[in-house]
Image (cartoon, grey):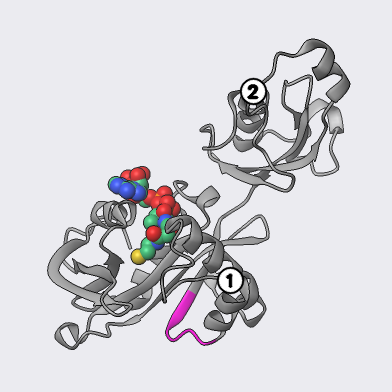
């Protein structure tokens, strides 16, 4: 099934009708104008039941290849404009079936957008740390500057014309892992996680790093979801640990050893 993008295009609020007819509600709608969700058919996290109830049939149809709904309704035949079923504050979504993701080497014109993805994804992965950590991806400006100076190679994941994630890789920087490849970083926007894109980025880096004795990655100790992802992809902690930011933060090293029984085809 294709990935569909759900973009919040318009938000109405009929306050007169609410005042007349609605009981008070603490969080009637948490969506924001311009907010984007991606889905392969599951209700995306953060999208309310009301919206999903009306959007899901369109997602299923478009994601499975249907086009030209209602005899040429939309200019883009692989899209639909649908609103949620809240009559007091209807939200209009553009639903688009997307090709891809495309996994490709970064181009000079991608650098600023990739820096922005780094900033947003870092802050989503480590909420509350932007002000505390010296290694923080604290602002888009700082991240764009960092992205311009990144050592190693970078693959980006592009979905519907937007960069949603990246993977940086190169030779291992550890003396005791000479000859190994290393994943320096993988970051995806939260809204693009869980769709198989992280694994596609890892596959692309592996194709460049192998043959070789294996691939390493350093992961913050408290980043359990990322450790789970790497374990699922065949990495195992090798016992090496290090601290950074003057000893305030700790990371563990995970290693994937090349062998016959690869966890997925390369
Ligand atoms: C970690 C990250 C790169 C994973 O990418 P993703 O696109 O969300 O993961 P995928 O959808 O490609 O998952 C691939 C497989 O791993 C599995 N998986 C993902 N996270 C998992 C977890 N925490 N535990 C166990 N399995 C997991 C998936 O179920 C999937 O399995 P399948 O191929 O058998 O269906 C992404 O979530 C991310 O960017 N997180 C925030 C930034 C971060 O922490 N980066 C790592 C810094 S070192």
In the displayed structure, would residue 77 be above or below residue 184? above
Q: Residues within 10 Å of mark 1 (few under 14, many from 20)?
A: some
What residue does disc 1 label? 139
In the displayed structure, would residue 250 be above or below residue 61? below
Where residue 160 is drawn, which disc sits there? none
How many labels were placed on the picture? Answer: 2
Mark 1: which secondary structure?
loop
In the displayed structure, would residue 49 be above or below residue 231? above
Q: Quadrant of the C terminus?
A: bottom left
Residue at coordinates 65% horizontally, 46% vertically from top-left? Answer: 36
Q: Is residue 134 visible?
A: yes
**Residue interval drawn in magenta:** 149-154
Q: Quadrant of residue 109?
A: bottom right
What residue does disc 2 label? 50
**Camera-side residue of 256 and 66:** 256
Name the outermost residue toward the top.
21
User: Residue 21, percent across and down?
Assistant: 80, 11
Please report contact status of discs 1 and 2: CB closer than 8 Å, yes or no. no
Q: Is residue 3 visible?
A: no
* 1 or 2: tag closer to the N-terminus: 2
Q: Quadrant of residue 247?
A: bottom left
User: Residue 54, percent across and down?
Assistant: 68, 23
User: Mark 1, mark 2: which one is toward the viewer?
Assistant: 1
């Amino acid at each position: 099934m294709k990935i569909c993008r759900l973009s919040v295009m318009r938000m109405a609020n009929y306050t007169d009708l609410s005042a007349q007819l609605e009981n008070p509600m603490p969080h009637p709608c948490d969506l924001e104008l311009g907010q984007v969700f991606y889905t392969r058919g599951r209700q995306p996290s953060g999208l309310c039941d009301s919206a999903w109830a009306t959007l899901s049939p369109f997602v299923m149809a478009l994601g499975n290849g249907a086009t030209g709904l209602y005899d040429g309704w939309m200019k883009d035949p692989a899209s639909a404009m649908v609103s949620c079923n809240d009559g007091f504050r209807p939200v209009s979504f553009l639903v688009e079936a997307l090709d891809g993701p495309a996994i490709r080497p970064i181009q000079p014109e991608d650098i600023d957008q990739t820096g922005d993805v780094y900033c947003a994804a870092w802050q989503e992965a480590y909420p509350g740390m932007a002000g505390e950590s010296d290694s923080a991806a604290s602002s888009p400006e700082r991240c764009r500057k960092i992205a311009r100076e990144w050592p190693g190679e970078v693959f980006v994941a592009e979905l519907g014309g937007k960069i949603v994630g990246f993977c940086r890789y190169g030779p291992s920087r550890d003396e005791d892992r000479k000859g190994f490849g290393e994943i320096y970083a993988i970051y995806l926007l939260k809204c693009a996680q869980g769709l198989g894109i992280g694994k596609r980025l890892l596959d692309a880096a592996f194709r460049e790093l192998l043959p070789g004795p294996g691939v390493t990655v350093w992961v913050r100790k408290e980043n359990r979801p990322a450790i789970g992802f790497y374990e699922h992809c065949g990495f195992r902690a090798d016992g090496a640990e290090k601290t950074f930011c003057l000893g305030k933060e700790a990371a563990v090293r995970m290693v994937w050893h090349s062998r016959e029984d690869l966890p997925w085809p390369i």
